[in-house]
């Protein structure tokens, strides 16, 4: 069977790593021999070892290291893959450059909708360092086309999740709210995600401030940790929102966030196909999301939630107000979102669709 090498420079563990594990599990079932090239300290190493995959290391986050190229080339020489996947931007660029000339077919999965420049600073990675690119939403596919990548070198494959852990969570609402310290009769608006500027939590706080006087039962719960924690807490204090906005840091288990919620939000400025939004849809939650990335491909405006312009606190507040004023609409939209995601975003399609790309590359 073919040998497949996965390259990953990220050290954390978020949606992309969840998808990578699912792909590795799928290809193992198909009999592929797999290896992993990681940056030192990568949390994915434990996953690779759990799956029994051999691991090579290279300083994929340090382009200036003199041993970078040699360590990358060692992994390619020793494993000699037939196909290589670059699972993130850094590995795509650094390992892609070092592996030029190796016989393996190469592909990458583009996961976020940042603009891509034409030429050697951007589009070059997709036209010269890989044979094919998978876009996880159509918004990313459009970015690739604008950067000069040929349509026949792009395949749209939506991420997928196992819906099992998320469905039925709202039946645990009372217990989850007790564990999180939330009032049983509150209308809880949530966001679960890393606290970074691109996620837009500061815009959500601005929007929420417009609602608290009109809807005293409303509570905003922002689960997660990150570089914006201090700034967001200062914003809450400055706006005198007090106990109305909760910033608890990372919540474990995260299932409690969805179980306790009435509405889920994702007001991001840049996004891919947000795993948190998929989780919320499987939890039958209505969503208010921005137009970033694939958000509007998960949420159908006016049917499963509302889609508002990026950075527009007034539009975000107006959408949330509709649910606060009509909770039954929130429940109906959540049910419709669950039904749609069960058709489009479950994990059973992900492996076969990526495997079809791999087999196309091998056949070529």
Image (cartoon, helix red, strand yellow):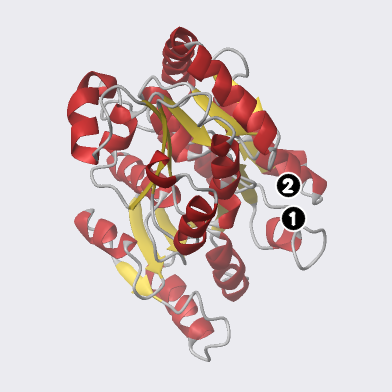
The answer to whether residue 227 shows anywhere in this view is: no
Pinpoint residue 190: horizontal percent, then vertical percent. 42, 35
How dense is the environment of label 1, judged by Cα within 10 Å: few (below 14), some, or many (20 and up)? some
Label 1: which secondary element: loop
Q: Between residue 320 and residue 307, name the one nearer to us.
A: 320
Pinpoint residue 212: horizontal percent, then vertical percent. 50, 32
Q: Is residue 106 above or below residue 27?
A: below
Per the model, the C-alpha gap separating discs 2 and 1 is 7 Å
Nearest to viewer (mark 2 / mark 1)? 1
Q: Name the residue under label 1.
A: 116
Badge number at residue 243: none
Pinpoint residue 7: horizontal percent, then vertical percent. 46, 63
Residue at (74% x, 52% y) in the render: 115
Q: In this view, does 315 lie above or below 34?
A: above
Pinpoint residue 70: horizontal percent, then vertical percent. 49, 85
Residue at (40% x, 67% y) in the render: 37
Q: Do the residues labelled 2 and 1 touch (CB within 8 Å)?
A: yes
Toward which corner of the image does residue 145 lie, by quadrant? top right
**218 relative to 149 in the view: left or right:** left
Badge number at residue 144: 2
How dense is the environment of label 2, judged by Cα within 10 Å: few (below 14), some, or many (20 and up)? many
């Amino acid at each position: 069977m073919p040998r497949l090498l996965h390259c990953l420079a990220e050290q954390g563990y978020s949606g992309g790593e969840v998808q990578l594990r699912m792909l590795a599990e799928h290809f193992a079932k198909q009999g592929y021999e797999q290896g992993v090239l990681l940056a030192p300290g990568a949390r994915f190493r434990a996953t690779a070892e759990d799956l029994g995959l051999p691991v090579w290391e290279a300083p994929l986050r340090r382009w200036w290291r003199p041993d970078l190229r040699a360590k990358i080339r060692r992994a390619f020489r020793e494993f000699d893959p037939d196909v290589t996947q670059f699972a993130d931007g850094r590995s795509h660029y650094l390992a892609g450059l070092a592996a030029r000339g190796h016989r393996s077919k190469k592909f990458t999965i583009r996961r976020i909708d940042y603009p891509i420049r034409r030429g050697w600073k951007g589009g070059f990675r997709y036209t010269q360092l890989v044979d094919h690119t998978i876009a996880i939403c159509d918004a990313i596919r459009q970015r690739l086309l604008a950067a000069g990548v040929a349509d026949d070198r792009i395949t749209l494959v939506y991420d997928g999740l196992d819906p099992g852990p998320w469905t039925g969570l709202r039946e645990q609402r009372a217990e989850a709210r007790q564990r999180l310290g939330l009032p049983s009769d509150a209308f809880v608006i949530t966001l679960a995600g890393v606290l970074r500027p691109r996620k837009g939590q500061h815009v959500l706080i601005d929007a929420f401030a417009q609602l608290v006087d009109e809807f005293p039962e409303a509570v905003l719960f922002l689960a997660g940790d990150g570089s914006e924690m201090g700034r967001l807490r200062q914003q809450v204090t400055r706006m005198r929102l007090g106990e109305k906005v909760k910033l608890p840091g990372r919540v474990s288990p995260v299932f409690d966030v969805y179980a306790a919620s009435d509405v889920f939000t994702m007001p991001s400025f840049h996004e891919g196909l947000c795993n948190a939004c998929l989780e919320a849809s499987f939890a039958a939650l209505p969503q208010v999301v921005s137009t970033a990335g694939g958000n509007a491909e998960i949420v159908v405006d006016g049917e499963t939630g509302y889609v508002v312009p990026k950075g527009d606190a007034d539009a975000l507040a107006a959408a949330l107000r509709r649910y606060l004023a009509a909770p039954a609409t929130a429940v109906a939209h959540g049910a419709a979102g669950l039904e749609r995601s069960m058709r489009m975003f479950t994990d059973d399609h992900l492996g076969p669709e990526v495997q079809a790309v791999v087999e196309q590359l091998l056949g070529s």
